[in-house]
Image (tube, helix red, strand yellow):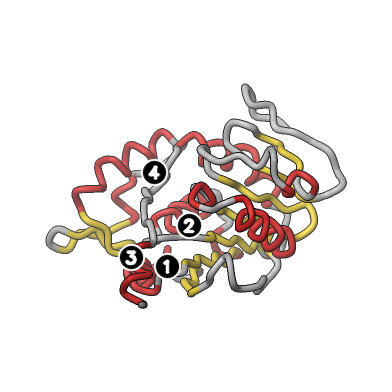
Amino acid sequence: MKKLLNDLSINVTEMFRDPSFFKVFRTEIIPILRDKPVIRIWHAGCSSGEEAYSMAILLYEEGLYNKTRIYATDMNEQILEKANGGEIPITNMQLFTRNYQQAGGVKEFSRYYSVDDNVAVIQPFLKKNIVFAHHNLVTDFSFNEFHVILCRNVLIYFNNKLKNRVYHLLYNSLSDEGFVCFGSKETITDSEATTFFQIIHSREKIYYKGKKHFSIKEEGNRI
């Protein structure tokens, strides 16, 4: 049963996948996080870890990584072992480098990994503040309070009942004035989640929890 579950779970990811999302996150969300003494980020459905490592790079370049703890979770224990190892086929790095540059990266992407045969190995300093752990979005409960939750391109595989279960979980896991980020292919327009979150960037599916009302100008860089 465990092998069947692992085989059925879908693990599609890239470093800096959807570069425009990371660019908006860098220019619009990072300035808000900068004043927090500690930053907690949850990558729900992290797959093999590329998105979590991308966030670590972004935060490092913005000078915030040392005060950040990233929690990356998935239901697939086998893929979590791969994520924790931080090993990526070297053939993927050309695409990931292009994604990084389009996402607003400011350094040489190759500095963030070493090469061992045909494998790119994420540098240890990027792994020190990431915790990979097993978590099932459908059956498990909230385990912390986060300033940012990323659940990108996960819920497209869920029916409406399961989606609403997850929206409640994410709401309960998000701090006041926190942000939840869904994938570009997802929408929560017709779900219960619209009673909890307000959308602040429609194209990149970034939502906000709190009474304060604001939005991100999608053609500019101001909130």
Distance Cα–Cα, label 4 vs label 3: 20 Å
Residue type indicated by callout 4: Lys
Label at residue 86: 3
Q: Is 200 in front, or is 60?
A: 200
Eye-nearest disc, 2 or 4: 2
Distance Cα–Cα, label 4 vs label 1: 18 Å
Q: Earlier in the sequence, mark 4 or mark 3?
A: 3
Find out whether the residues at labels 3 and 1 contact each other: C-beta distance under 8 Å. yes
Residue type indicated by callout 3: Gly
What element does badge 3 sit on?
A: loop
**Local crowd at mark 4 within 10 Å, few (<14), some, or many (≥20)?**
few
Indicate left or right for 129 with 107 as reference.
right
Residue at coordinates 64% horizontally, 59% vertically from top-left? 166
Q: Which part of the image, by quadrant, shows the C terminus?
A: top right
Q: Position of residue 123 (x, y in %)?
A: 34, 63
Residue type indicated by callout 2: Ala
Q: Position of residue 129 (x, y in %)?
A: 50, 69
Distance Cα–Cα, label 2 vs label 1: 8 Å
What element does badge 4 sit on?
A: loop
Label at residue 56: 2
Quickly name the residue at label 1: 127
Find out whether the residues at labels 2 and 1 contact each other: C-beta distance under 8 Å. yes
Q: Position of residue 101 (x, y in %)?
A: 38, 36
Label at residue 91: none
Eye-nearest disc, 4 or 3: 3
